[in-house]
Structure formats: C-alpha cells, structure tokens
Image (cartoon, rainbow, N blue to C red):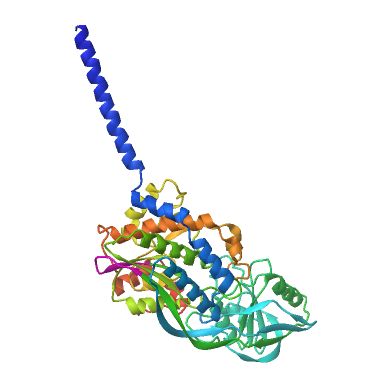
Amino acid sequence: MNLKTTVWNAEMKYRIVLSVFLLCWTTIECVSQSSPLHQRMVGSAFLDNASYAMLMRLSDEAGGRWIGSPQNELGMRILVEELRRHGLQPRLERFTVPGWERGDDEIRMIEPSDRVFRAVALGYVDATPTFEAALVWANRGYTDDIDTSDVRGNVVLVTQERLSGREHLLRSEVIDNAAAGGARAVLFINDKKGRMYLCGMGNFHGAATPIPAFSLTWEEGHRLRRLLDRKVPVRMRITTNSRCLPIESANIVCTLPGTSNEKIVVGAHFDSWDVGQGSIDNGLGTAILFDVARILHSLNITPERSIEFVWFNGEEMGLWGAKKYVELHRDQAIHSMINMDMTGSPRGFNAMGNDHLLPLLQELVDGMHGFDMSRGVASIPWTNSDHQAFMLAGIPTVTPMGYLDPEMVATYHDFGDTFDLVNRRYLSEAAGVVSILTYELATRLDIPLKRKSISETKDWLVKYKLDERLKKQGEWSFN
C-alpha cells in the first residue's frame, strides 16, 4: 500500500467517524431538548408567575372562602378580576345546594370547674337549644363502645386515633352510632397536638346531623379524658347556633376552544374552611390553575380538544361544585379531567387507574429533566376530592403527585392554613408541569376518548375497593 492510498484511507476513516459523531450528536440533541412550546410554558411559569400575587390577594383580602359566605363571594370577584386582567373570559355557573353556616357555638365545662373549650362544630350540625348533660367516655365510637357506655341523655367524648387491626370509622358513623344510643352530642378529640381542632363535615349529603357534633383540640380533649379516667364527674353545657340552610353559589369556568367537540377539564376547588385563610387547601390548586390558564391562553394556540378551566365551589362541604358541573356537562365529550388539590412541587403523575394514559405520563416524566420527578408514574385511584364526581361518571382522571413542606400539611383544615406557608417556587414548578400535561392531553389524538359505561364504572370501582368507602359515605349510586 503506497503513501497516497494510506492517506486516502485515513481521510475516509476520519470522514466516516465524523459523520457518525455528528449523527449521534444530532440524535442526542433531539432527544435531550424539549419542544420550544414546552420551554415557553415552563419559562412563563417562572418568569411571569402571576399565581403568587393572586393567591396573596385571595388570602389577605378574602381569607377563608367557605361556600355561601361573603368571603367566598369576595374571593370569586377577585379571581374573576385577575383572570380578566390577563385576557381570559371567565363565566359563573350558578347552582343551589344544601348549605351550612357557622354560628356562635359554645362548648362549656361547668363541673368540676368553669371552662369554655376551643372547639368547632362539624359541618351540617344544626341549631339546637342550649342544654346541660354529663360527659361520658366512649372510646372510638364503635357500636360496641356505645353499647358498653352510659351514653343515653349524655354528651359522648371519643378519640379520633386509629385502632390497629380495626376499620376506622368516619365521623358521620360515630355520630349515627351515638345518636342511636340516645346521646345528646358528640365531642371528637383531634388526633394531632398543637391546639388544632381539625374542621370537618358531619356528613357529605347535606342533611342535618341527628345530634350536635364538635371537634376539640388534642390538649383540651385529653384534659376531659383524664378527668373521666379518674372518675371525676364532668358536666357540660352545649350551645349550638350553627345552622343548615339552602345556599346559592357558583363554579368559575374559562374555556380555551379547540377544533373538535371533545374537551379536557382542568380543575381545582376554590372554597376553603372558614377558620384560616385557605392558602394551602386549596389556595395552591386555585393559584396553579390560574397560572395554567394564563400560560395556555398566552400561547395563542387552538388545540384539537377544548380546554376548560374550572374552579369548583363547595368541595369541602361535599364536592358540590364538581357534582353540579358533571350534572350540567355529563353529556359532553369530556376526554379526561386533571384535578389539583393541595398540589405542591411536582414529583410525578397518578393515572388514577386509567392505564391507557400511562404511556403519555411516563413519556412526560422521562422528558422533564429539570424537575425532580422521582415518584414517577402511579395508577392508584382515590376518593373525596373533585375528581370523584368525574370518576363516578366514567371519565378518566389524572392528578399530579407533589411534595409539600411538613408545616403545610400540619395546619390542614385549621387556623394555621395561611399565606405565610406558600412557596412561590412550588407554584411555578407545578404550573409549568401541569401546563405541559394539559396541552399534551388536548393535542394527542393517539389517546382516544375512553369513557366507561355505568357497568364498567361499577366494576372498576369494586376492583380498586373504592365501593366500600363510597357506600359508607352514602355516595354509592350503583344497584
């Protein structure tokens, strides 16, 4: 082989290696780079964040947004004003539901000493004339606890601590057990320390509870329990001025029109408990949804499927807003629903038992290199948030899986749920991730509309053992 041939061979090898390298580099670049549209969504979520300031207004100006209250109505006006400021056109879908209004209630110990306790009435506790009665201990409120306690004509004290190896009772079940035994009221001891009383509902179907029921702080509840353990007679005076009444409220809805008759619903509940500011539950979901709507509207896109942004009202009182929305829109071609309830820093997605969505969700997780998506993709459905009404109608639902700081969760349904706990970065991260998820669901025609029939929905709920919880709550509508 002469020198010229050697040089030619070497040059050809170099060109081949270079070509292969450039081909691989181009492939690597294509794989590692997200789409420009995804980049714009995430960039706007951080650089143009509008959710933090909007949530500050909701928290400080309106505060706790209990459905039917003046604070809820003020909060809706603030949200509508902020949406319009960003070019969106919100509308109100009004409805009437069984409501509840907190009154000037009082739980007072009159023997062995005088003390007004830190307590809150549970939702749907109705006004009852003031009465006095002895206090008795009934453990966790199971039927056998009630049967072995002298509850008739007395006030029942129970703990909410779980008992290992035995099914945990809903508070509505304990109330019904106590009422059946002839008790005049139930006092629940919160299972968390910190002078918190854990607001909650007496039931989720809108009927007045058979007897008054209140939640006490752990500290004061255990004071009462110690007295009873030592056989010290305790007498209580119960004053209940809260009341049940019909209320009118509304869901707030914005629509980004698509080219087909199908649509994606992206939702979060707007209401909150009255005792705090509702900044975490569910100010987070409310604010993130606000920014998702702003971001997608600003892109001037026309997706294949319409995107409907819905701020549901009355979730805390029984998922009323979501139920009313599904009643009104159930005949429409709803492809899927994304629910955000106390959404934090995104860590993955939950397909909620809709396994046909798993490939897309996994693709998104794999492509979000700048986020900690360490929880990956799950497919485990659960109940008791706004997506439940959609599940019962056979509509696939998705929820982001997120991280919340411990102090954010510790103040759940209590006074400490305030704006001071909100993390602006979490809002931006979630808005970017959910914007991408929403856009992909609205444009990916390879994921067809897949709505379950009534019989398929029933079998699916039984498969995931959700029927037991729904039956206990009185929300099982399948024969």
Question: What percent of the width, then of the height, locates residue 211?
Answer: 59, 87
Q: Is residue 19 magenta?
A: no
In the image, 384 versus 241, the foreground residue is 241
* Quarter holding residue 294: bottom left
**Residue at horizontal 28 percent and vertical 72 percent from the top:** 453
Observer-nearest residue: 3 or 173?
A: 3
The quadrant of the picture occupied by the C terminus is: bottom left
In the foreground, 173 or 250: 250
Q: Position of residue 360 (x, y in %)?
A: 33, 54
Please say if 132 is above or below 287: below
Residue 259 within the magenta-colored segment of the rendering = yes
Residue placed farthest to the bottom in the image? 129
Above/below status of 12 relative to 182: above
Q: Position of residue 358 (x, y in %)?
A: 34, 56
Q: Indicate whether 436 appears above or below 120.
A: above
Q: Quadrant of residue 103?
A: bottom right
Residue farthest along the top direction in this orientation: 2
Magenta stretch: give its range.
255-265
Tell whether 82 sits left or right of 215: left
**Residue 350 visible in the snapshot:** no
Residue 323 in sight from this viewpoint: yes
Which image quarter: residue 263?
bottom left
